[in-house]
Image: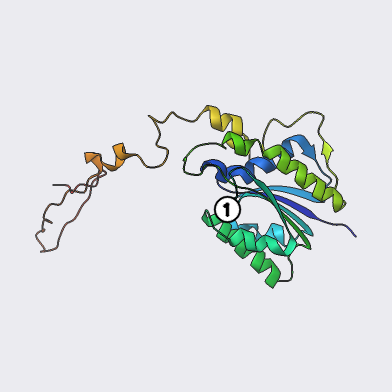
Amino acid sequence: MIQHTLILGIGNILWADEGFGVRAVEELDRLYQFDQHVRLVEGGTQGIALLEYVEMADNLVIFDAIDFGLEPATLKLIEDDQVPNFMGAKKMSLHQTGFQEVLAMAQMLDRCPQRLLLVGVQPVVLEDYGGSLHPQTHAQIQPAIDSALNWLADNNVEATRRESPLSEPLAGAQINIRKYESERPDEHRACRVGDSRVLQSPDYELEYRPHPINSSGKIVCDVDHRGKYDD
């Protein structure tokens, strides 16, 4: 019987190590190829939209950044029935809540993959908007891939090393990690967590003025682009 396998990377690349899962599956696709019964998906933060992929799979491999409560950049493998528990514990972002629901719905529909593997890494840094993976986290991508390939081989799913690595990632050139890192604006041009220069700027203050009343006796309340009432 043919076994269908889904290899899924989830997370938000805009928040540093939150993007580990996406970057791991991109690198896997860049270096290896599989037969037609294996699908690689950059799931990002799609949540419930991933159900249609999950319910068609017999084997499911998930790459993600997970708060295991371990030392930063620690790699941990979780299998089968324990996977939903870790997807829902110590949530770091909404995508984890969404994917826990995906697994629950697949189970309810009796279409959950028979075998599951979660390849998770303990994040080093998250609060860095627009940032890429921390070097320690990035260094765990290849070990994560190796662990997934070993598990897949044990389940009769083989990968072949590409003679020439792909130049464009799964989701397209725009989120290529090298392009993403090289084109990031410096911290003086783009905030990292929350920029007091914006939050305290008078251009964004809400200035109260009494509401004018038109000839019909109705209140007129127009707000301009800076949040101030027009005269």
The percent coordinates of residue 124 (x first, y second) are 55, 42
The percent coordinates of residue 47 (x first, y second) are 59, 57
Q: Secondary structure at mark 1?
A: loop
Q: Quadrant of residue 182?
A: top right
Q: Is 135 on the left or on the right of 30, as rendered?
A: left
The percent coordinates of residue 36 (x first, y second) are 82, 48
Mark yes or no: residue 170 visible. Answer: no
The percent coordinates of residue 222 (x first, y second) are 21, 52
Task: Determine crowd level at label 1: few under 14, some 14-19, many 20+ residues with C-alpha closer than 10 A.
Answer: few
Q: Is 197 on the left or on the right of 13, as rendered?
A: left
* Residue occupying the point 74% across, 42% down: 145
At label 1, which amino acid type do we have? Answer: Gly
Q: Quadrant of the image for the N terminus?
A: bottom right
Where does label 1 land, which residue? 69
Whether 171 is drawn above or below 209: the answer is: above
* Residue occupying the point 59% across, 61% down: 88
**Most extreme residue toward the right, as rendered?**
1
**Most extreme residue toward the front, as rendered?**
71
Q: Is 83 on the left or on the right of 221, as rendered?
A: right
* Residue occupying the point 79% across, 63% down: 114
Q: Is 116 on the left or on the right of 178, as rendered?
A: right
Q: Quadrant of residue 177?
A: top right
